[in-house]
Image: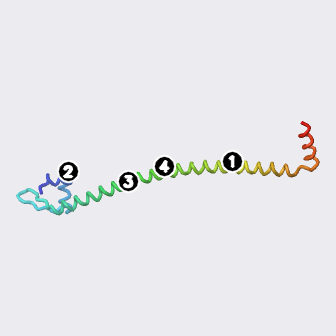
Amino acid sequence: MTIQETCQRLCKSESTIRRMIKAGRLIAHKKDGVYDISNESVNDLSNDKQVVDNDKTNEQIDNALITQLKLENESLRKQVDQQQAIIMQLSRNQQLMIESSEQKKRRSWLSKLFRKATDTAN
């Protein structure tokens, strides 16, 4: 492959491809002042790029899932808070009913009798 073909294949600039050749990341042979780059080394780098792209995609998916889970957690917290408020209100009502019932039991037989007498008189 030529440098230009490699640039298009890897979506890199010509200077980047030349640096990669000098660094040994691409295998190339120079013939008459023109580089001939090995298809194998380009394929290897292309596969590496796909792995990096897949990692980025997976990271984006993970971030989206994390955001969705945070929203669901917040919604569930609000539901739990509402249910706890309802439970507290029901507990208060129950306590008031118990206290009212106990007060009725504490009345003396005379006050109960007096109350019955006034109720029938009305």
Amino acid at circle 3: Ile
Q: What amino acid type should be assigned to the residue bearing mark 2?
A: Ser
57 with respect to 118 (left or right): left
Q: Residue at x 18, y 62 (%)?
A: 41
The reply, left or right, for residue 121 in relation to residue 81 is: right
Residue type of the residue flagged with mark 1: Gln
Residue 103 is situated, as x and y percent measured from the top left of the image, at: 84, 49
- In the picture of the structure, the residue carrying the numbered disc 3 is 61
Mark 3 in CB contact with mark 4 (< 8 angstroms): no
Earlier in the chain: of badge 4 and badge 2, it is: 2
Three-letter code for the amino acid on which mark 4 is drawn: Leu
Question: Which mark is drawn over residue 98?
Answer: none
* Callout in the foreground (2, 3): 3
Q: Nearer the viewer, residue 90 or 8?
A: 90
In percent of width and height, residue 38 lies at 14, 62
**Quarter of the figure with the N terminus:** bottom left
Q: Residues within 10 Å of mark 3 (few under 14, many from 20)?
A: few
Marking on residue 13 = 2
For mark 2, give the secondary structure: loop
Q: Earlier in the sequence, mark 3 or mark 1?
A: 3
**Foreground residue among 28 and 64:** 64
Closer to the chain start, of discs 2 and 1, is 2
Above/below status of 75 relative to 55: above
Name the N-terminal-most of marks 3 and 4: 3
- Relative to 60, residue 23 above or below: below
Q: Are marks 2 and 3 in contact (CB under 8 Å)?
A: no
Residue 71 shows which numbered tag? 4
* Disc 2 packing (10 Å; few <14; some 14–19; many ≥20): some
Res. 89 mark: 1
